[in-house]
Structures are given as structure tokens and as C-alpha cells.
Image (cartoon, rainbow, N blue to C red):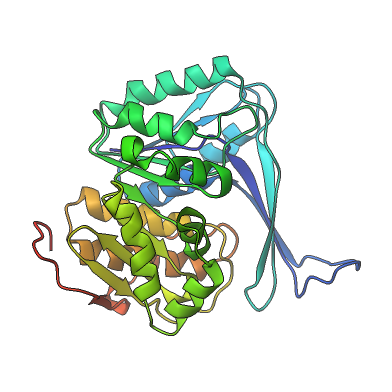
Amino acid sequence: MIITLTPNPSIDATLSVDQVVRGEVVRAHAASREAGGKGINVSHAIAKAGGETLALAPCGENDPFLQAVDRINVPFVPIAVDGFVRTNTALTEADGTTTKINELGPELSGERRVDVEKQLAEHAHKADAAVLAGSLPPGAPVDWYAELTAQLRDTVPLIAVDTSDAPLRALGKRLESAAPTIMKPNAFELAQLTDGDGRALEADAARGDYDSILRAARELVDRGVAEVLVTLGGAGACLVTADGAWAAAAPKVTVRSTVGAGDSSLAGYVMARVADKSFAECLQQAVAYGSAAASLPGTGIPSPADVDCARVEVVALDTPASSPRV
């Protein structure tokens, strides 16, 4: 089973517009509202694939978010909290450009944080993997992901973390003692961890030059992260481990919305890891899932019928000295 924790879940509202023009009235020609948040999206993809998953998130007992989760058929454990789950709004333009406006979310008190940790520990014993993902709500310590990872390391075989900004930097400072198994930064998040230039990393990847990304990712591997999955949008993704590195270009798709694409990539990767596939196959499935999600409207979470791994070519970027998996 793959469990997920979304400390700051959301209702994802997606508005499809022709073009966003500042200061003007912009009319939406389509709209959707779905349960979201990074961990919720990961569990959604796993559930659609017929996998066993359980999503945990803070949520009040009368929150409409409960019905939203029920509609997407994701097994869910709500952890009581005051206030309502936030709404994140995405404006998706005709050319695929997505602008996101994210609310802060309700405050998580110290008592509620303890409740989250207890629930996570209770279900961790049954888990093959745990995914901790998304922003942290007001009131949560900035290094909470490091604390949670340290608590889970002796219980869960695979721990993946996907976050950004201050929580990501705080985790980065504690990798020697609290490194997760898997980290999934994009180019800009990788730059946050390594004092690099995210735009330069992304531009290098678009040209097929992965050297700068490999150097940055290996800094994390050297500090204890077993697997660094760097998602690169339309350029695909790279995977770096102690034993090797691989790149996969994204297949050409018509981009309809990028909301949830990174989460789908992580879901594809973790499902492949739990199935004991090779690292190359894990990367292939990650890119296939992310590309499929980008071709769907709204928070498009793909089903297996949407995913075509055969269209994703994986290239080894160096020769592993030894690898038990590839």
C-alpha cells in the first residue's frame, strides 16, 4: 500500500480561458472543482490504476472537501482541523499556459499536528511507501517534513517528499539526518536546494544538456537521498541515484493543463518502484504519467488507458558501477 500525507489540501478550481489579460474582465468557457493537493493527487492516480492507497489530510468534519474526495473514489482518512480546506485556482489559457493562485489554508495547531503524526504512524506499518507532499499550512514548523521523515524511516521502506520553497530548504538543511528515499524537485526546486539557477537548469535540459542537473542532483545523493527525480516539464525528467543517471524526453502532447502533472509523475514513479521495476522503467512510467496528465483538462489525473510508456525513451547518462535494480 502507498500512503500519502497532504498537510495542506485544497479544492482545485480550474478555469479555462482564451487569454489572461491584467486589468480586464476575463470570461471562462469551462470550469471544474476537484479535490486536490499533491498527496491527494498522487493517491488519486494510484487509485485509478487499481493500486492500494490511503490518503491522509487535515479536514473538518463538515468540510465540502470530504464530498469532493468521495467523488474521486480515493480512500481517505480525515484528521480533524478547524476551518475549511483552501481553494487553489488555476487559470488555463488556450496555449496551455497555466497561472495558479493558491490560498494559505487553515492554521494547524500543535495539538492537530500531533494528531496528524499519530495517524501517519498508525498507518505507516502497513505501507510499502509513504508520500509526503505539498505546502505546509500556517502553524506548521518549516522543518516538519524533516521531522516526519525521521519518524518514518525505521517503518516505511520508501519515503518520497515533494515540496518547495521554505519547507524544501528546511528539509535540505537536514538531509544528513532525515533524508527521504526519494525527492522530486523540478528544476527551480533543485536550484533552491543547491544554490543554483533554475532557469539555467531548465534551459540546459531543453537543449539536451543534463550535466548541470546531474551535478546538482548528485549533491543531494551525496547527502543521503537515494533517488532524485527531477521533473522538467516539456523536457521530460532525469533520475539520479548513487549507481547511475537516466534521462527521458517527454512525448509530444497537446498541453491542456499542467495542474497535477508533477503529482502524476511522482505517482507513476512510486507505483513502479513498489512494483520493483528497474530505475529506467520507473523513470519511463513517471514521464508517461506526467505527460498524460498535461494532456488532460483541469487537475487531470490520468488512468492507465491514458498512459503510454512505449512513447517514452529512456537514455542512460552514465554507466552505473553496480546496480541491483537495472
Left or right for 208, reference 100: left
At a point 28% along the width and 53% down the height, the residue shown is: 222
Q: Is residue 236 above or below residue 271?
A: below
Q: Quadrant of the N terminus?
A: top left
Where on the picture, by quarter, is residue 106? top right
Residue 44 on image: x %, y % = 44, 47
Q: Is residue 191 above or below residue 222?
A: below
* Viewer-nearest residue: 240 or 290: 240
Residue 289 on image: x %, y % = 39, 64
Residue 107 on image: x %, y % = 66, 27
Left or right for 126, reference 234: left
* Viewer-nearest residue: 192 or 35: 192
Where on the picture, by quarter, is residue 17? bottom right
Residue 133 on image: x %, y % = 47, 43
Left or right for 57, reference 245: right
Q: Is residue 224 above or below residue 293?
A: above
At a point 47% along the width and 72% down the height, the residue shown is: 201
How many numbered discs sit on the rendered protein? 0
Q: Is residue 252 above or below residue 282?
A: below
Whether residue 301 appears in this view of the structure is: no
